[in-house]
């Protein structure tokens, strides 16, 4: 008897779980479900099955699963358009960052609750005048008795209005010639006095990110992650986790799957669908390779940048292929497909922006190639 390939059993378990959830109407498939699908109860259900914090040590609430097993789980969830946004940032990047740089006290405090799907964290990097040029952040932390006083403004912080904490990149010492010096990462309790969280509505009418104003917010010293002043190195490793996963090419997969099911597609649509399928397969292979490198403790920033650059542009192309294939059809396009396409069209402009723009990713790739 030959052994089943790694991940087969867990893939079947996730599919079975999703069938059950769909059956009892807990969600309907959505494009961009890792951004738009915020469901604390769904996150808790995943936590109960051990599908959050999967690769983390058992003593921190994890399962010590392989990176590939985690990849299989999130691939299935994304392909089904399941609502995974509530825990996404905490599971994808904050947890791994804490395992690498956090104190044991922080790990004990945050990781088990993240793995249970009970604690949600938003990413506080961008500011009104700092996006691509992240080292120019102006949010300031000044030392006070027992910690820091933080003042400034963060923007586009996904689900900050529905999260418990924001992990913010702040300046802890005055700007020097090398702007990467003097930055730190701190946990901001989003209920603390001085924190004002204002949701921002997007074109589709949904408010999935927020502006966060910080007015002399007290942050205890125990809430600094890693070394004071080491924020740049830490945030760039956080960004590698942020850019490396299959969500960077699967945001519109449910739309693609629905399109493939359409009957009597014309020759152009069939050719375009074939081309998308081939490229999705290639990207998947690269993304699996990224997981292997992460498992080996390597920092695959170039590979992650490649997945995100190629993947986020392909996600947009899927929207165009679906639009061309359906635009003149009066019959056979079901309301579900129309709705997926509508949401995808409104979300598409953000695909190549979030997590680092195409130009910035290509800069990373070119620098590593010695250009
Ligand atoms: C849906 C969504 C969710 C987001 N979630 C979060 C979040 O949770 N937390 C968070 O902190 N941020 C978040 N962001 C913000 C995101 O990280 C920034 O939008 C992104 O980094 C770009 O920054 P910017 O918008 O300030 O654009 P800018 O940096 O002002 O860039 C504008 C344009 O100029 C180009 N450009 C800039 N610099 C260069 C250069 N050196 N060379 C060539 N071209 C350049 C860019 O590529 C881009 O086309 C989110 C954004 C979106 C759309």
Image: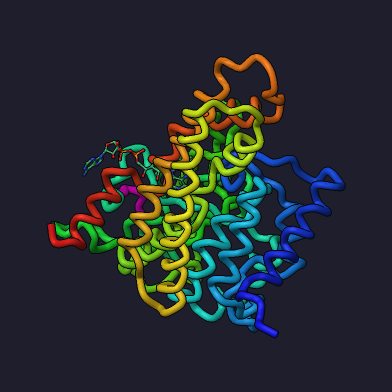
In the rendered image, residue 39, in percent from the top left (x then y), is placed at 71, 48
Percent position of residue 76, x then y: 64, 56
Report if residue 328 lies within the magenta region. Answer: no
Foreground residue among 141 and 265: 265
In the image as oriented, which residue stretches furthest toward the right? 24
Q: Is residue 162 left or right of residue 149?
A: right
In the image, the segment drawn in magenta is 137-141
**Residue 11 falls in image quadrant:** bottom right
- Say whether residue 8 is visible: yes
Placement of 235 over or under 257, stated as above or below: below
In x, y percent, where is residue 161? 60, 43
Q: Quadrant of ligand 1?
A: top left
Quarter location, residue 265: top right
Left or right: 46 with respect to 107? right
> What number of labels is visible?
0
**Residue positioned 61% across, 69% down in the render:** 53
- Which percent across, then down, holds residue 116? 71, 66
User: Residue at the location (42% across, 79% down)?
Assistant: 296
- Above or below residue 213? Residue 324 is above
Residue 145 visible in the current orientation: no
């Amino acid at each position: 008897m030959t052994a089943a390939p790694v991940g087969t059993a867990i893939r079947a378990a996730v599919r079975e779980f999703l069938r059950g959830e769909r059956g009892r109407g807990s969600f309907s498939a959505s494009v961009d479900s890792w951004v738009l699908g915020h469901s604390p109860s769904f996150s808790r259900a995943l936590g109960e099955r051990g599908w959050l914090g999967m690769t983390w040590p058992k003593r921190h609430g994890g399962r010590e699963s392989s990176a590939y097993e985690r990849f299989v789980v999130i691939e299935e969830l994304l392909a089904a358009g399941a609502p995974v946004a509530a825990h996404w940032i905490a599971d994808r990047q904050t947890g791994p960052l804490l395992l690498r740089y956090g104190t044991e006290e922080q790990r004990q405090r945050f990781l088990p609750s993240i793995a249970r799907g009970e604690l949600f964290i938003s990413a506080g990097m961008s500011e009104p005048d700092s996006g691509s040029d992240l080292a120019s952040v102006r949010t300031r932390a000044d030392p006070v008795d027992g910690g820091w006083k933080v003042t400034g403004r963060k923007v586009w912080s996904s689900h900050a209005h529905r999260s418990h904490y924001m992990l913010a990149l702040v300046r802890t010492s005055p700007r020097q010639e090398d702007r990467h010096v003097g930055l730190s990462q701190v946990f901001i309790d989003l209920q603390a006095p001085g924190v004002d969280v204002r949701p921002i509505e997007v074109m589709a009418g949904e408010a999935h990110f927020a502006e966060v104003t910080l007015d002399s917010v007290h942050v205890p010293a125990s809430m600094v992650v890693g070394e004071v002043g080491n924020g740049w190195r830490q945030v760039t490793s956080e960004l590698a986790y942020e850019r490396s996963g299959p969500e960077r090419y699967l945001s519109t997969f449910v739309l693609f799957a629905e399109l493939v099911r359409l009957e009597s597609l014309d020759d152009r649509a069939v050719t375009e669908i074939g081309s998308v399928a081939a490229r999705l397969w290639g990207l998947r292979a690269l993304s699996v390779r990224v997981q292997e490198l992460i498992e080996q403790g390597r920092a695959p920033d170039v590979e992650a940048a490649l997945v995100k650059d190629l993947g986020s542009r392909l996600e947009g192309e899927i929207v165009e292929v679906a639009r061309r294939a359906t635009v003149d059809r009066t019959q056979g396009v079901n309301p579900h497909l129309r709705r997926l396409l509508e949401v995808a069209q409104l979300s598409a402009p953000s695909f190549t922006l979030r997590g680092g723009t195409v130009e910035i990713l290509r800069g990373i790739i070119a620098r590593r190639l010695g250009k």
